[in-house]
Amino acid sequence: MVMVYKYINIIGTSPNGIDDAVKDAVAEATKTIHNIEWAELGRVTFKVIDDDIKEFQAEVKMGFKIERKD
């Protein structure tokens, strides 16, 4: 049996912190993508308004196994 994987990049956001931004990205991805087996934190950015961080943005790279229905 041949295993084929695909990866996607998703950016999660949160006003509360990087951890919540990552969790939000994974939670949203699992609503439509199955078989996610790994995730990697990529770039982290911040939205700054009036000299204050208002939003955390975390790029999350996720890998999942492709399933075929034969």
Image (cartoon, helix red, strand yellow):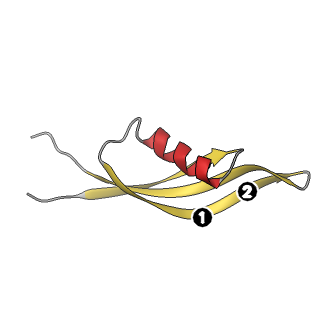
Q: Position of residue 50 (x, y in %)?
A: 91, 51
Q: Position of residue 25 (x, y in %)?
A: 52, 46
Question: Residue at image x 47%, y 46%?
Answer: 26
Residue 43: mark in rendering: 1
Q: For the view shown, which residue lies furthest in the right direction?
A: 50
Characterize the local packing of mark 2: few (<14), some (14-19) or many (20 or more) Cα atoms within 10 angstroms.
Answer: some
**What's the residue at 41%, 35% (across, down)?**
31
Please tell me whether mark 1 sits on a helix, a strand or a loop. strand
Q: Which amino acid is tagged 2?
A: Phe
Please, is residue 65 above or below residue 69 in the view?
below
Q: Residues within 10 Å of mark 1 (few under 14, many from 20)?
A: few
- Residue 4 shown left or right of residue 27 in the figure: left
- Mark 2, residue position: 46
Pick the quarter of the image with the N terminus: bottom left
Quadrant of the image containing the C terminus: top left
* Quarter-of-image position of residue 45: bottom right
Which mark is on residue 66?
A: none
Give 5 or 37, whichever is nearer the viewer. 37
Q: Position of residue 51 (x, y in %)?
A: 90, 56
Q: CA distance from mark 2 to mark 1?
A: 10 Å
Given residues 63 and 70, the one toward you in this image is 63
For image coordinates 53% across by 46% down, the residue present is 23
Q: Is residue 9 left or right of residue 56?
A: left
**36 horizontally vs 13: left or right:** left
Left or right, 30 with reference to 20: left
